[in-house]
Each structure stands twice: as structure tokens, then as C-alpha cells.
Image (spheres, rainbow, N blue to C red):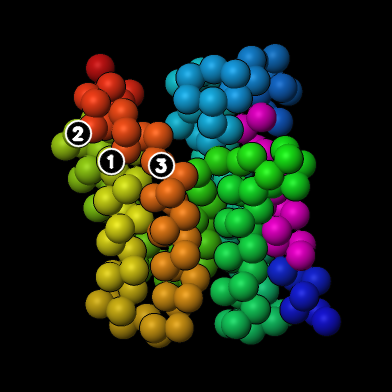
Amino acid sequence: MKGILIVLFSYLLGSIPTGLILAKIAGAEDPRTRGSGNIGATNVLRTAGKTLGVLTLVGDIGKGALPVAVAKATGGDGVAMAAGLAAFWGHLFPLYLRFRGGKGVATAIGVYLMLAPLALLIDLAVFLGGVVTTRMVSVGSLMAALLMPLIIPLVGYPTSLLWVVTPMSLLIIWRHRGNIQRILRGEEHKIFS
């Protein structure tokens, strides 16, 4: 029963729309109506500024890390993996926004921070390499999502972790399908331009 409550808590915490709440508190426009229409850190950065973008990033990472930390302390590794997946699912499909959420990259970072920190460091290097090379956050996100399921076993994490990492990677890629189309058309947003 405790494990079920932790997973439910994780989903509800993941459902909190950090970027939207911060934009409203700051008097900025709703990020769903500007830029890419996403509630995540990259769009909040573009539409509401650096401070709100960074705060959104930190909040979304926290939504992934906190439930996993609580689950590890109280329910064990299996519950921690389920909690991480639930928090991630909550960010993508939030109860509070009629199941229309973000792309999940920052929340996935929080989950990986608690479940596979070494793999996360390698994956962040992949992400940064993609962003620096192309000046597109979406390319870095897609590269990191594609490679994380390969990195997990390569650095010695248990393959059971792939039950969490693989669906998260697939969902991140699926949520970036609009970005993929814009990349192919040469219309994707670039940073530092």
C-alpha cells in the first residue's frame, strides 16, 4: 500500500506545471500561448526570460528527483523506479492541465540524477555536445534520449533500470515529433543566434 501511495504522490507532483505557475506568479504570459506552446524550461526561457527559465528547469528537475529520493528512502529500488516513471508521466500528462504537459527532459534529468547519476553525467555531455554543435536544444534532447538506454548497461547499471529509461526515452522522442519536423524543414529554433 505504501508503494502505491508513493507512486500516486509522484504522479501528482510530476503533474505540477512549474513553468506555468512561475509565469503566472511573475505576471508573464502563459507559456502555452507563446513560443513553442510548451510549459517546459526551454520555452519559458525564450518567452519569459532567463530567471524564470532557470527556475522552471530547477523545479522540473526537482519534480523528478524528489519522488525518487522519497521512494528510495521508504520503499526500495523497485518503488523508486516506479516513482520516477510516475513523476515523468505526470509531467507529460498532468492531471491539472487536462493531460497536456511538457516534453519531460528536465523531469527525466531529476529521475536519472537519483537512479543513475553516472549515466546522467555521460548523457548530459551528449546533450551539451548536440546543443553546442547545432545550437538546437531539441537536437541535444533527442540525442540524449536516444543514447540513454545504451549508456545504462555500458556503465554497469542493472538492466532492470531499462524498464524505466526506455519508455522515458521513447516518450521524450515522441513529444519532440514537432521539433523533428521543424529540424527536417530547417525551421527549428536555435539558441545563441
> Position of 78 compared to 24: left or right?
left
Residue drawn at x 72%, y 22% as measured from the top left:
24
The quadrant of the rendering that contains the C terminus is top left
**Which region of the structure is painted magenta?**
8-20
Q: Is residue 62 above or below residue 17?
A: below
Residue at the farthest right position: 1
Circle 2 SS class: helix
Q: Amino acid at mark 1?
A: Val
Earlier sequence position, callout 1 versus callout 3: 1
Q: Position of residue 78 (x, y in %)?
A: 60, 82
Crowd band around label 1 with a 10 angstrom C-alpha radius: few (<14), some (14–19), many (20+): many
Q: Position of residue 104 (x, y in %)?
A: 51, 48
User: In the rendered image, which residue does mark 2 sit on?
Assistant: 134
User: In the rendered image, which residue does mark 1 sit on?
Assistant: 139
Asked which quadrant contains residue 87, the reply is: bottom right
Q: Position of residue 77 (x, y in %)?
A: 58, 82
Nearer-the-camera pick, 176 or 130: 176
> Position of 80 compared to 130: left or right?
right
Circle 1 SS class: helix
User: In the rendered image, which residue does mark 3 sit on?
Assistant: 176
> Position of 181 compared to 89: left or right?
left
